[in-house]
Image (cartoon, rainbow, N blue to C red):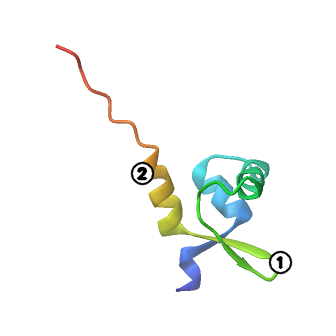
């Protein structure tokens, strides 16, 4: 996987619009988004962050 597709914790938090602490809390609770743990480093794939956002997408409908 090309390195430019992996984001560190701070970059991922910024990309999603959440705090680093929120991502840390979600990891400790085994909640999405998916991440890679390489030794002490945590990395997020941009495609996984996009998939996470897509699962939370709300498409409003207009009642007639």
Q: Looking at the rendered structure, which numbered label has been put on residue 5?
A: none
Please tell me which residue lies in front, 26 or 60. 26
Say which residue appears at 53% left-offset and 60% top-offset. Answer: 49
Mark 2 nearby-residue class (10 Å; few <14, some 14–19, many ≥20) = few
Mark 1 nearby-residue class (10 Å; few <14, some 14–19, many ≥20) = few
Q: Secondary structure at mark 2?
A: helix
Outermost right residue: 40
Q: Secondary structure at mark 1?
A: loop
Outermost front residue: 30
Say which residue appears at 79% left-offset and 50% top-offset. Answer: 21
Q: Determine whether 1 is above or below 19 in the image.
A: below
Q: Position of residue 47 (x, y in %)?
A: 47, 68
Marked residue nearer the N-terminal end (1 or 2): 1
Say which residue appears at 53% left-offset and 86% top-offset. Answer: 2
Q: Position of residue 1 (x, y in %)?
A: 52, 86
Please state if 46 lies on the left or on the right of 61 as rendered.
Answer: right
Outermost left residue: 64
Q: Which residue is denoted by mark 2 in the rendering?
A: 54
Q: Determine whether 49 is above or below 54 in the image.
A: below
Please state if 62 lies on the left or on the right of 34 as rendered.
Answer: left
Q: Determine whether 53 is above or below 47 in the image.
A: above
Q: Position of residue 20 (x, y in %)?
A: 76, 53
Residue 28 appears in which quarter of the rendering?
bottom right
Location of the C terminus by quadrant is top left
Q: Which residue is denoted by mark 1 in the rendering?
A: 40
Q: Position of residue 48 (x, y in %)?
A: 51, 65
- Disc 1 to disc 2, how far (Cα)? 28 Å
Say which residue appears at 69% left-offset and 57% top-offset. Answer: 30
Please state if 17 lies on the left or on the right of 42 as rendered.
Answer: left
Callout count: 2
Q: Evaluate if marks 1 and 2 touch, with contact meaning CB atoms under 8 Å apart.
A: no
């Amino acid at each position: 996987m090309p390195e430019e597709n992996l984001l560190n914790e701070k970059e991922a938090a910024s990309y999603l619009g959440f705090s680093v602490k929120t991502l840390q809390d979600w990891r400790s609770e085994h909640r999405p988004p998916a991440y890679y743990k390489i030794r002490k480093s945590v990395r997020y794939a941009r495609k996984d962050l996009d998939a996470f956002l897509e699962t939370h997408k709300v498409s409003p409908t207009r009642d007639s």
